[in-house]
Image (cartoon, rainbow, N blue to C red):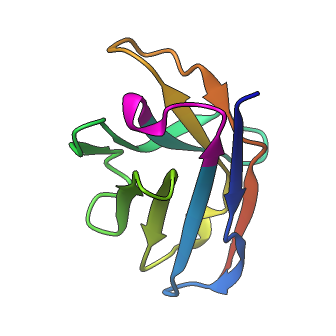
Amino acid sequence: QVQLVESGGGLVQAGGSLRLSCAASGLTFSNYAMGWFRQAPGKERAFVAAITRSGGTYYADSVKGRFTISRDNAKNTVYLQMNSLKPEDTAIYYCGAKMGGGSTYNYWGQGTQVTVSS
């Protein structure tokens, strides 16, 4: 079955960096666009970044210039490099896999906690 497993979360001070990874299995990774979303306490899940099958990238305005999404199809892994972290970046971060051009993600990981202290 399809599995997406996130890792790399943790506690970091404001201004610090983290790199999240999402390892995929059970699917043909190169056929899927991949995305990162986050959910802060009391808020809905929100889009953070996405990367298409061909490597095109998209970002939420709140993270542009600070976060970078990338993928390694040989390792079936998508990454989210997060720099200049702010306390408002604190959330559970989820990766998703999407086939096709629509907005619906087909598969989700279990999430990894990112906490940014001030």
Range of magenta residues: 24-33
Q: Nearer the viewer, residue 7 or 58?
A: 7
Identify the image quadrant of the N terminus: top right
Identify the image quadrant of the C terminus: bottom right
Task: Report x, y in % for residue 90.
Answer: 66, 63
Relative to residue 41, is residue 79 drawn left or right?
left
Q: Is residue 23 above or below residue 115?
A: above
Relative to residue 104, is residue 13 drawn left or right?
right
Q: Is residue 18 above or below residue 35?
A: below
Task: Report x, y in % for residue 43.
Answer: 70, 37
Say which residue appears at 22% left-offset and 39% top-offset: 54
Q: Nearer the viewer, residue 26 or 93?
A: 26
Relative to residue 90, is residue 18 drawn left or right?
left
Number of numbered discs overlaid on the protein picture: 0
Say which residue appears at 67% left-offset and 33% top-offset: 108
Task: Report x, y in % for residue 22.
Answer: 60, 54
| Residue 32 part of the magenta segment | yes
